[in-house]
Amino acid sequence: MSAGETLGSSDTTATSGDLPGLFCGDGVVNEDEECDDGNVLDGDACRNDCTRRWIVFITSEPLKQGKFNGITGADYECRHRATNMFLPNGERYMAWVSTSVVQPADRMYHARGPYVLVNGQQVAANWDALTSGTLEHPINVTEQSETVDVAVWTGTDITGMRIPNTQHCSDWTYNDTDQTGWLADGTATDAFWTRGVEAICGASAAIYCFEQP
């Protein structure tokens, strides 16, 4: 049975696979579960289908220029801010940013449960929904739970793949006006949430941050 199927009339859900006796709610995290807290309450950190909610946010002030020390620097910005605000798994956040060789689709966890903002608003039901081209809610809430209207450095298409044939501000190590990188609209729920316009690297923008296992 799959993680979403029920066993008879009970509230206990079964996991998939060929291992009898393992089920959602048994307190053991099995291979097709993101969590298992031993209960079937849906309002806590672990949902009753043994998926969990994954926090996403947009970085608050100060905004970044195209030079933020590459992927390493972008991830640091996310982890530093998440840790300062005591968000879950603060040291495990990653930036939704691509370079000429690295992209979120390859390095990020493809969540089975929903992506939610710091204030609880749902952005997407899972990874497939996140990369479908349409969000339920824009990623416009910071780690401080403040709503902002800003541009966002991404270099990334809706599928989580890098946008080709672009400089990515020398893989985000450059902030002058003779190179470009891709900016997205932090208020958008269509494709512009991640793929917006090509802009000079001296422009200021934020970064999207995604919680990881």
Image: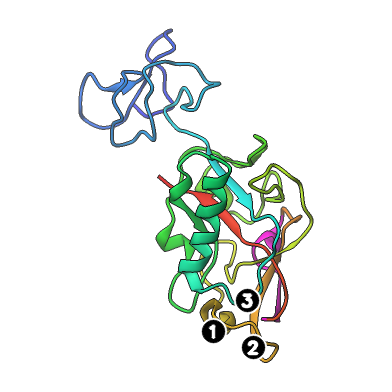
Q: Examine the rendering and report whether any part of residue 213 can be seen.
A: yes
Return the residue at label 2: 179
**Extent of the magenta region:** 190-201
Return the residue at label 1: 170
Q: CA distance from mark 2 to mark 3?
A: 9 Å
Return the residue at label 3: 66
Q: Amino acid at mark 2?
A: Gln
| Quadrant housing the N terminus | top left
Residue shown at 64% from the left, 88% from the top: 179
Q: Amino acid at mark 1?
A: Ser
Neighbourhood count class around disc 1 (C-alpha, 10 Å): few under 14, some 14–19, many 20 upward = some
Are circles 2 and 3 on residues that touch, CB within 8 Å? yes
Q: Amino acid at mark 3?
A: Gly
Q: Secondary structure at mark 2?
A: loop
> How many labels sit on residues?
3
Q: Residue furthest front?
A: 84
Q: Secondary structure at mark 3?
A: loop
